Amino acid sequence: MKIDWANDWHGFELSITTYCQANCPLCVRTDRSTGKLKSFIELEHSNIDTIIKTIRDVAKYTSCEKIQLCGDYGDPLMHPNIEDIIYEVHKVGLWASIHTNGGIRNTNWYKRVAQTPTVIVFGIDGVDEPTNSKYRIGVNFDKAMENMKTFGEYAYKGNCLWDFLVFDYNYDQLDAAIKIAEEHNIILKFRINVRDWKHKITDKKLIGYINSKYKGKLL
């Protein structure tokens, strides 16, 4: 079965952890006044037995084709049993889709997972550390980029996606990002940030320019 991962996100979304090493300003887990984790969020991993039962129930009782591990309150790759979870998803005949900032795990882990039909979406918003760290606070950029490149090179074609959020400080790196993606078997998509933040692009002419130049790569 061929699934258009860039456009077809129909599936069952499963949140498995509230752990994350990042403090992205616009994340729902980040307190804007302090830049830290919101006080009401408890750090915990979902029970592996409960996760496996849920995956099996989704496969048995729904028409979903995919389990999406997006991680609204945490990065899925922080879960200690993430690899077992991935293999369970495929074992029951579903596809796994994971969203991550990329700075977790190592290249050997990504090489192993690349041997499965798993899609990984990397949230990296620049082509160097100073740029990416303005939003992806706490993420090791070099590690994230290396992990994404590795997964792109070893994964099935089309299974490595790069979700690049565009702000007023990184739009000039879009061409460089395209070059990196083309060299490493990565599908690159840009999203102009529309949420209220100090680096939101407000210049309508600039937005029009980006929309026009990169329309084929905009989500």
Image: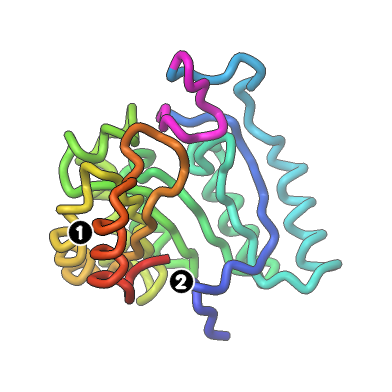
Neighbor class of circle 1 (other Cα within 10 Å; few <14, some 14-19, many 20+) is many
Percent of width and height locating residue 3: 54, 79
Indicate which label's residue lies in the foreground, 2 or 1: 1
The residue at 54%/45% (across/down) is 82
Distance from Cα at disc 2 to Cα at disc 1: 18 Å
Percent of width and height locating residue 44: 63, 26
Count of marks placed on residues: 2
Q: How is the image coloured?
A: rainbow
Residue 175 left/right relative to 133: left
The residue under label 1 is which amino acid type?
Leu
Residue 62 left/right relative to 191: right
Neighbor class of circle 2 (other Cα within 10 Å; few <14, some 14-19, many 20+) is some
Magenta highlight range: 22-34
Residue 103 colored magenta?
A: no
Q: Residue 174 got which mark?
A: 1
Label 1: state its secondary structure.
Answer: helix
Depicted 83 relative to depicted 182: above or below: above
Label 2: state its secondary structure.
Answer: loop
Residue 185 left/right relative to 63: left
Quadrant location of the C terminus in the rendered image: bottom left
Quarter assignment of residue 199: top left
